[in-house]
Amino acid sequence: MRDIRMKGLTRRQALAGGAALAAATSVPTGWAIAQAKPLKVGLMLPYSGTFAKLGENITHAVEMLIAEKGGKLGGREIQLIKLDDESKPEIAPQNADRLVKRDQVDVIIGTVHSGVQMGIHKVVSESGTLCIVPNAGNGAVTGQLCAKNVFRTSFTNWQPAYGMGLAAAKKGFKKGVWVTWDYAAGAESGAGFKEAMEKSGGEVLPSLVLPFPQTNFQPLLAQIPGLGVDVVGSFFAGGGAVQFVKEYAAAGIKVPLVGSGFLTEGTLEAQGAAADGIETALHYGDGLDNVKNASFRKAFLQKAGREADVYAVQGYDAAQLLAVGLEAVKGNTDDEAGLYKAMREAKMDSPRGPISMSPSQNVTQNIYLRKVQGTENKVIGIAAEALADPGTGCKMT
Ligand code: PHB
């Protein structure tokens, strides 16, 4: 971390280390004192609004991994500082700044919303604070604005939507439309779907959009029957996705609804029969048959009192990635080169299967085709194998 606090002893550290200094027979180095201190991790996530459950699941999973490691990563105790970002981009820079300057966090794990991510990105690009993105998919963060201190354990908005476009074309759909919120995640996922459909000779009309986080879907739904499309693709998530899927079914529209997998992720209990049969593409599915997934789902259910979903997986992997880095440098975050090298080269056993980082520090991963059956997103195939975001424009410093 570029943060000068870690280089020598600040007044605060000297005070904190005072007792240790007095008790010691030999004078500990700045590093030894810094290492004895807990590592502060800011969890900047939505704990209210349409994405509240997403932020909660990420948090549960981060806490779970830390507990599995006995409360310490690389020998450092972990102190979590939670901040509700409310999925509001306009207050994101102040919020991130508060974590870095006032709370003096060593790491930010955040966030869910692509617009809020831009605010965090601005702050961590300037301060050099390590940032691990546990959901938000905006391409720029691991594209033209990529930075060596920023890692992402989730996806780019392009990845699942591109996979869905490939799968939709393969099923024979020729003309589609994307329905979504009017912000980065909606636009980038729509572009991915369109790119894949067009590559296969299909066509996608201009998106139907409404402002985030609004849910007055009726004017959009009313347009669909007149468009002459044979498939409707969609990006919504959290509470908004619950409502959209219910209203789509209630409207009696005959055109099949597909989407980035968030449309039916962590939402199926609430969507009920309205979601039955919907096919989506995502880097996770409920029935993924691997040892890690089985133990992860069991532990998550025990901790959170509800089933795991992709958000939980991404949060768990954010904490796993931090653990890999800290273990490599034995908790010495002053060894920035060693810390980032270990994170870049991490090979992790994720509940989604084995994962590694792409050159722009996003995950290279399978995009699964899933179909809703009852309260499960059953994996029915692979929409795109080992798909890496191209990381266009990334020049890693
Ligand atoms: C995003 O804003 O990038 C975003 C939000 C929720 C999701 C996926 C992406 O489920």
Image (tube, grey):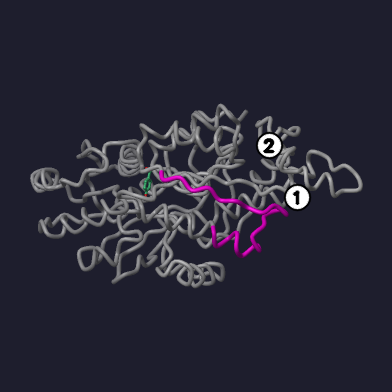
Q: Quadrant of residue 377?
A: bottom left
Q: Name the residue tied to disc 2.
A: 12
Quadrant, the C terminus: top right
Query: Does the numbered disc 1 mark a residue whose Cβ is under 8 Å from ligand 1?
Result: no
Q: Name the residue tied to disc 1.
A: 330
Disc 1 packing (10 Å; few <14; some 14–19; many ≥20): some
Outermost residue toward the right?
A: 25
Disc 2 packing (10 Å; few <14; some 14–19; many ≥20): few
Amino acid type for the residue under numbered disc 1: Lys
The residue at 36%/52% (across/down) is 52
Which of the pair 382/253 is nearer the observer?
A: 253
Quadrant, the N terminus: top right
Mark seen at residue 50: none
The residue at 53%/56% (across/down) is 62
- Residue stretch rendered in magenta on the structure: 63-84
Amino acid type for the residue under numbered disc 2: Arg
Residue 252 included in the magenta stretch of the image:
no
Which of the pair 330/189 is nearer the observer?
A: 330
